[in-house]
Amino acid sequence: MLLHQPRRPPWTRTAYGTRRRAAVLLVLLGLVTLAAAVAGHGVGERLAPGGWTPATAQSTRADAFLAARFGAGQPHLMLLATSKEPVDSPEAARAGRALTDRLTADPRTAWVHGYWPRATPELRGRDGHTAVVAVRFKGDERAVLAAGRAVAASETGRAGPLRVSVAGEAALFSEMERLSTKGALIAEIVVAPVVLLILLWVFGSVVAALLPVAVGAFAVLTTTALLRALSEVMTVSVFVLNIATALGFGLAVDYCLLLVSRCREELADGASPVRAVERAVRTAGRAVLFSATTIAAVLGTLMVFPLTLTRSLAVGGAAVALCSAAGALLVLPALLVLLGEKVNAWDAFARWRTGPGRPVAEGRWYRLAMWVTRRPVLVTLGTLLLLGLLAAPGAGARFGMYDDRVLPASSPVAQASQRLRQDFAGGSGTAATVVLPHLRVPPVSDAPAGTAAVGDGSTSDGATSDTSGGNAPAGDASANGAPGGTTPSGDASANGAPGGTTPSGDTSAASEPAPAARAGAAAATRVHTYAARLSGLPGVRQVRTATGVYHHGRRIAAAGPWAAGFTGPAGTWLDVTPTTDSPLSPDGRLLTERLREEPAPARALVGGPGARLTDTEQALTGPLPLAMLLTVVATLVLLFLYTRSLLVPVKAVLLNALSLAATFGIIVAVFQQGRLEVLLGHAHGPATTDVIIPAVMFCTAFGLSMDYEVFLLSRILEEHRRGTPTGLAVAVGLQRTGRLFTSAALIFAVVMASLAACDLIMLQFIGFGLAVAVVIDCTLVRALLVPAIMSLAGRANWWPAKRLRRVAE
């Protein structure tokens, strides 16, 4: 029995029922778009560059504690000053002191630790011609990035006899932003003509090809305005702008293809422009509405992760999906009503295009679907086997986070960072930190007499006392740790670094009563034992703290004047130099786990790069089951409401998961394992898979694959509700929509693939991964698996829809 068509949505009867109403609506929407463009102006300056680690994470709290109480922690910017003459020569020293004074006087700096004026040994390179000045800025991430960019612009280059280059977190973010903008611009210039040709071929006319531009502009501008408003009440990651633009463009093409093609079908059947638009919105518009709602709901589940980045993606992704749907259901129909038959004007490929009167049964997609439905078991097993093989490399993923090595070798920031690793002991910013709040240890050089046995190290450690802090283990230029890393500047008590250490004389035993002296001695003994244990852990090169320098479970050097920088009224802390120069790797995570599992003499906070990676992974893996559950439930419920079927939504979720698993396996094989180097070139990044980027990429890929699923289901459902048998309904639906979603996927894949030619490996990762994801989805999944599985399921596809309709009758 033929089913009644759904009711006409209210907006199809009132918003653009006539050309005049459509014109009025279009003017109003134009004003809304203009207002959104004004409101969203300067949104990039309001967004945060990071958002990778939870604000409440142990590593974040440890770094903030060091910065506020000890003038230590991870520096935001590191300036490498190189001179032809030794850095201790009069001219170089004069220029170095001037550089340090300028940075210290800058009101944006929290502290400055430099080689000058006190010639701190660990801040001088091995060749004696390079020195480091480390800077930490005040304020939030936006303020740090702005300050780092300004300081780098003013100080980089020639400064008298010194040549200054920059490295560090702030420089890395700025360089990534520059390369990202450059790569996107090159991609737009190169790809724009190709995309325009594809749009002309797919839409059939110049006029129709420009419609996605209008819808995409409306979606992106309104989303930008919403992000600008949200930035006033929450921290929003700048990364969401790129995702919103990519997803907005992809959805604009999808929705325009679906609605324009349906409107053309109605016009070809003799309907008036107004009537054709109403029918298109009533059928294809319903699919657009459900698709956008599903995407918004699925992306909204990212709110369960306690990361600024993921929560920004949740808000931005949901906003762009709903704004794209609003543009497709308001802006596009109004344009179609006004254009009428002119939507087919200026068809540049008319002579090569098949006419609209071609029977459905002669279409390529129809023939493919019928071929699949005649051998569904073979196609299903073969396709599942292929997807499994593609997904297999994902089991060997080694998760980490990208550092400066994602930059091309030609980047000045990459060159400065590489020199830091090569010329300075312990590398650059690789050390882990262990903070012991409220456990104050007097520096051994100022300690009470009762701590002498702990301080000299001559009896049990086999090393004589050395107040210079020397006697480093083999391979270290200095026992004092990494340059400009987490350690203070060698004599922080004398320098009076901001938020620094105890005032001069505060640690003197003469002014302490006997109980306080005994407590200090006991605390020193506990820290001494703890530091010795940490230095013996696998992956630890040395430990430096207020009681000395430790290596392989033994103290190799007693405390020197620098020890005052490791203790104070707020507590004490330890600097742990790892053996690896890649702390943002599984090795760094493993070291962090060992440090956190080791019993401490007081409540401990472990920080540093490896700890940031660990905390980020925990923030993603902890809520992951809940996020997956919410995603599955939201998808099942919304698709059930759309199809009135239980099997079809389950099939959609499983196939999307298979598609994403295959995509993940491919990107692991290419970027971590180095496959396809002949085509893509050698990946200059670390041999790990970034823990954040796949989650970001899969948000976009899941949204687009769900889009294609709803488009295909919309026509299959329409045919089935007309009484067409399941196998034939699938074939007709695939013929009607196959060209649409493959064309949309081709356009999106071309745009994304262009990013693979950029110098920034993060853009290569995202561009290549998204291109692969949409290609797999529209070929293996939509063209083969969906017809095969639906053919095998037969009437079970529509259960309990028929029962629900009988009850309703």
Image (spheres, helix red, strand yellow):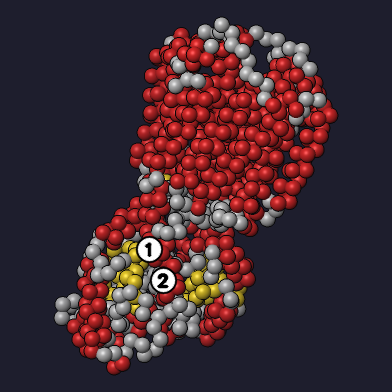
Q: Position of residue 56 (x, y in %)?
A: 42, 59
Q: Residues within 10 Å of mark 1 (few under 14, many from 20)?
A: many
Q: Position of residue 722 (x, y in %)?
A: 59, 10
Q: Is residue 675 visible?
A: no
Inspect the image, locate mark 1, and give the three-letter code of the amino acid beneath it. Gly
**The N terminus sits in image quarter:** top right
Residue 624 vs 435, above or below: the answer is above
Q: Residue at x 51, y 74 (%)?
A: 110
Q: Which mark is residue 120?
A: none
For residue 43, which quarter of the picture?
bottom right
Q: Nearer the viewer, residue 750 or 74?
A: 74
Residue 164 vs 259, above or below: the answer is below
Q: Are marks 2 and 1 in contact (CB under 8 Å)?
A: yes
- Extreme left residue here? 459
* Secondary structure beneath label 1: strand
Residue 717 vs 135, above or below: the answer is above
Inspect the image, locate mark 2, and give the three-letter code of the amino acid beneath it. Leu
Q: Which residue is mark 2?
A: 66
Q: Position of residue 807 (x, y in %)?
A: 49, 13
Q: Which mark is residue 607?
A: 1
